[in-house]
Amino acid sequence: MSILLGCIADDFTGATDLANNLVRNGMRVAQTIGIPQQVLNAELDAVVVALKSRNIEPEAAIAQSLEALEYLLAQGAQQIFFKYCSTFDSTPKGNIGPVTEALMAALGADFTIATPAFPDNGRSVFKGYLFVGDQLLSESGMRDHPLTPMTDANLVRVMQAQCQNQVGLIEYQTILAGADAISSRIADLKASNTKIAIVDAVTNDDLYRIAPALKDLPLITGGSGIAIGLPSNFGLQAHPTSSKLPLASGYRAIVSGSCSQATNLQVECFKSLGGEMYAVNPLELNEKSTEQMLQEILTWAEPRLSHGSVLIYSSASPDQVKEVQSQLGVQAAGNTIENLLGSVAKGLVALGVGQLLVAGGETSGACVKALGIDQMQIGQQIDPGVPWCFAKVQNKPLHLALKSGNFGAADFFTSAFSKL
Ligand code: ADP
């Protein structure tokens, strides 16, 4: 197998988001959890290696990204894509700048672009400034992010602070003028020794105009938006078979450890439709072992699975979460609940679940880890940013959808299954 595009994503659900955009535009894609130890078992156009490198030390992020690069090049990748968040989540230390420069050096690339523009999700870049919906990045909720507060919306400045090399801008007028104008602007920037350019883009049409000018770059960096135009550079077009997964089978279940607004709404909606649900009360962990709670949950689920989908959730309101955190500790609560829900996912699959929804980014990571999944094939989109995926767990087929907290419509927990 020789792939066309090799992708490195700095977090897990972001990797799925990127894979989803590539599949929708005609690529057959597998996502791997870290660098796979085994040979990938499908005909593929692209591989997305999901790292967890967004919030670690820059040196560690560089080392992991270079290891992923080596793996992707060994699979025949003709071009490399470094994917980060469409809100450019980073600090003056990195990791977007340092990883970009390390990948450029390893590939011998003298130029690359950086654009988090993702119009489908309201991220646009104009004159180098990033907007989240109608707000500047620095005026959006991202200014208060606990790990990567974004207090400057000017991406040329933000990226320059993280880079050794000169950072420039390809402005909107050039984008409107089309691919030839963009290519000639790239040539000018290179001539003036600018190595990285932030690229303006406000609509999907802009992204499609930019893509042909990126054809010969060894490295592209950005959010998942820019990926929509890349498959056509390899002669591929949107095609239903690229998202074709094997037929789904087995029982249906939902595991939710996300306490985000959208998920809480989805739990409510599932309830209003009369769904079978089990509320995990984390405070019981004060008296019971994780193993005991796990057995209680599985004993509840087993007789219900043959009647329809079941929901097991620890999702709770902000006040309830605060109460749990004050009793168990913030980190300990997160880890213990993730562990429990991971074991629940594994137990459900052992009981015959073949179609599994997981809500929550960290929760998804825990479930995939507990299930021992190291690669997933990406299928059709359920809602923006969330595709159905397919994996083998101990040689048994499993369809799974991993939903990051704020994604998905209110009826996601039921509508997702109807799209399989
Ligand atoms: P999201 O994508 O919505 O941010 P995550 O799964 O990434 O969801 O994060 C949710 C975190 O909250 C996880 O660490 C999870 O274990 C934790 N958690 C889940 N339920 C509760 C709860 N009832 N109280 C406290 N923490 C919780």
Image (cartoon, rainbow, N blue to C red):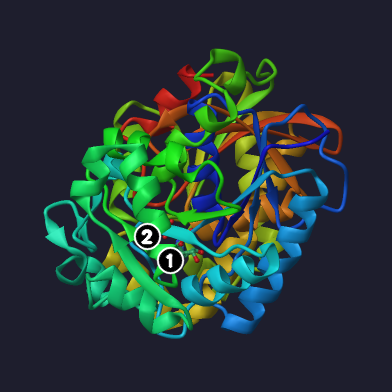
Give the quarter of the figure containing the C terminus.
top right
The quadrant holding residue 377 is top right
- Amino acid type indicated by mark 1: Ala
Residue 416 locus on image (x, y percent): 45, 27
Picture layout, residue 24 above or below residue 227: above
**Residue drawn where x is 31% and y is 43% of the image:** 181
Observer-nearest residue: 238 or 420? 238
Residue 256 locus on image (x, y percent): 48, 48
Q: Which residue is mark 2?
A: 188
Picture layout, residue 362 above or below residue 373: below
**Label 2 Cα neighbours within 10 Å, binned few <14 / some 14-19 / many ≥20:** few
Observer-nearest residue: 338 or 290? 338
Quick check: marks 2 and 1 in contact, CB under 8 Å? yes
Residue 127 locus on image (x, y percent): 19, 60
Q: Is residue 394 left or right of residue 309?
A: right
- Amino acid type indicated by mark 2: Asp
Q: Secondary structure at mark 1?
A: helix
Figure quadrant, ligand 1: bottom left
On the question of residue 271 being in view, the answer is: no
